[in-house]
């Protein structure tokens, strides 16, 4: 196979991410049980608040923490208590300091891929937070470049194609998110590898769309080795 350019997502592709957010949300919802709302309703209000905060403040733990607090204050109304706000802040600090948990087979597969192809890490989020995760993962040496972007839309992929002079037929986006990794990459003319993760964030889900490029669907990151 000729040398390809592989753009690789990070959260829930190279390391666990959403499962930790999910745990924090479960604790948060339990914490709010005394208010008398169903878990589904609390979840629904949180999702709405997150969508709004992401538009205003971007992705990341801080934006998420703000959404938890706002959801609590909205649902608790006049009975809101400062102790609960402090407990929420504690949960967010704990989430922030959780060490990266690299997914199975990732380092050896990156080592193999980096010998044959050009690898570019492409992650979206709060720049300092994502950079710290990359640093702590110890995986940066496998990549020719690390790109941290605000959002992953088809224009973002167009920019990557220009910036790295990627020949589209030899370029691939690899990730777990139909909304951010697969659909916009295919729309921009790249190929894509979808590696679903069971804990993919609600806001990343979407129907897979088709494009001009090829689409591979793999069960695990290590299976990349048999295709590249
Ligand atoms: Mg991801």
Image (cartoon, rainbow, N blue to C red):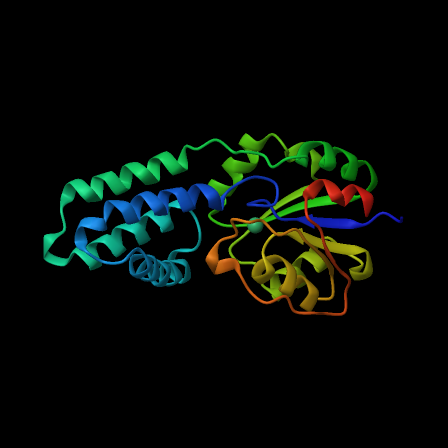
- Nearer to us in this view, 140 or 113: 113
Res 36 quadrant in image: bottom left
Is the residue 210 above or below the residue 97 in the image? below
Residue 27 at x, y percent in the picture: 32, 43
Task: Tell me if 169 is positioned left or right of 205 in this view.
Answer: right
- At a point 48% along the width and 53% down the height, the residue shown is 201
- At a point 83% along the width and 40% down the height, the residue shown is 116
Asked if residue 203 can be seen in this view, the reply is: yes
- At a point 46% along the width and 48% down the height, the residue shown is 126
Task: Tell me if 175 is positioned left or right of 81 in this view.
Answer: right
The number of numbered badges drawn on the structure is 0
- Residue found at the far right of this picture: 1
Residue 95 at x, y percent in the picture: 39, 38
- Nearer to us in this view, 59 or 77: 77
Residue 110 at x, y percent in the picture: 72, 37
- Nearer to us in this view, 178 or 64: 178
- At a point 28% along the width and 36% down the height, the residue shown is 90
Asked if residue 144 can be seen in this view, the reply is: no
Res 43 quadrant in image: bottom left
- Nearer to us in this view, 51 or 148: 51
Residue 143 at x, y percent in the picture: 69, 39
Task: Tell me if 198 is positioned left or right of 41 in this view.
Answer: right
Is the residue 140 above or below the residue 11 in the image? above
């Amino acid at each position: 196979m000729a040398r390809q350019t592989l753009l690789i997502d990070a959260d829930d592709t190279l390391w666990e991410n959403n499962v930790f957010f999910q745990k924090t949300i479960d604790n948060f919802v339990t914490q709010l049980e005394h208010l008398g709302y169903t878990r589904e309703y609390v979840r629904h209000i949180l999702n709405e608040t997150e969508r709004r905060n992401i538009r205003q403040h971007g992705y990341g733990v801080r934006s998420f923490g703000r959404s938890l607090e706002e959801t609590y204050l909205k649902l608790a109304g006049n009975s809101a208590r400062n102790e609960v706000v402090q407990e929420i802040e504690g949960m967010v600090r704990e989430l922030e300091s959780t060490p990266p948990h690299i997914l199975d087979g990732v380092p050896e597969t990156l080592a193999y891929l980096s010998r044959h192809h050009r690898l570019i890490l492409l992650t979206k989020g709060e720049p300092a937070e994502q950079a710290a995760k990359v640093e702590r993962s110890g995986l940066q040496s496998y990549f020719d470049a690390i790109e941290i972007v605000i959002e992953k839309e088809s224009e973002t992929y167009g920019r990557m194609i220009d910036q790295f002079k990627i020949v589209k037929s030899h370029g691939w986006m690899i990730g777990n998110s139909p909304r951010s990794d697969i659909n916009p990459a295919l729309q921009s003319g790249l190929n894509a590898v979808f590696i679903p993760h069971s804990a993919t964030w609600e806001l990343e889900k979407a129907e897979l769309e088709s494009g001009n490029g090829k689409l591979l669907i793999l069960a695990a990151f290590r299976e990349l080795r048999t295709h590249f």
